[in-house]
Amino acid sequence: MSNKKTVIILVTFFILLSAVFMGYFYKETRVKVKKLPVLGNPGQKVTDFSFTDQDGKTLTLNDVKGKVYVTEYFFTTCKGICPKMNENMTRVYNAYKGNSDFMILSHTVDPKKDTVQAMKEYSLRFEANPEQWKFLTGDKKELYDMARYSYLVSATDDTTGVDIASDFIHTDKFVLVDRDGRIRGQYDGTKPASVGALIADIGILLKEKE
């Protein structure tokens, strides 16, 4: 066999070997892409709602359909964890500011005090686009039912005999919802590392198909 033929055979062999290796590497890389879990019972999704935002506009489930969004519960007069939570939520907002497929829903747990005007004044601290970051108020029972049964942020599911006037939810959780209304993650809104993980996971969901 001539040296020329030997070289051609060796080159062809290494090209084929490289192609096989690259195909395997690509397959392994795809397998390792993070897949977020779906929380709650099988088939569970966020139920319909109707709340009022900081501009006095009504927001319903239909308005967030097909979008990825993060939700939280707070109150404007809170001096404890809420300021830290919304400082961290600003990081989330800035990471996806202007992305029409992403929203933030910040619900009050004290709608008696957190009127539309109060929510508007509070929202101005964050220079948030009201079309992307909603500060929501409304009926207290509906707000609390959403927290417990849709967003799963309260450890107390059985509220039998509980007077809604005295009921109170105070949680540090940021909840990530996908385009199909499924809960895909819960994060500690007071911890920068957890919020960083949330920001990364939002990116994963934005690339997912419904």
Image (tube, helix red, strand yellow):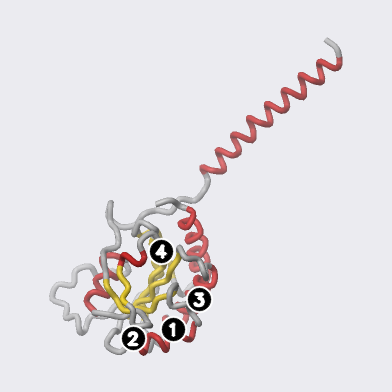
Quarter of the view holding residue 117: bottom left
Q: Amino acid at mark 3?
A: Thr
- Whole-percent x, y for residue 209 in the image: 43, 51
Residue type at numbered disc 4: Leu
Q: Is residue 121 above or below residue 171?
A: below
Residue occupying image coordinates x 49% and y 54%: 207
Q: Residues within 10 Å of mark 2 (few under 14, many from 20)?
A: many
Check disc 2 and report the residue beneath it.
116
Residue 171 placement (x, y as % from top left): 35, 75
The first of marks 1 and 2 along the sequence is 2
Q: Nearer the viewer, residue 179 or 145?
A: 179
Vertical relation: 143 (above or below) 27: below
The furthest residue to the left: 161
The secondary structure type at the circle numbered 4 is strand
Asked if the residue under mark 1 is in contact with the one under mark 3, i.e. CB atoms within 8 Å, the reply is no
Give the residue at x 23% y 80%: 167
**Of the residues tagged 3 and 1, which is closer to the observer?**
1
Q: Earlier in the sequence, mark 3 or mark 1?
A: 3
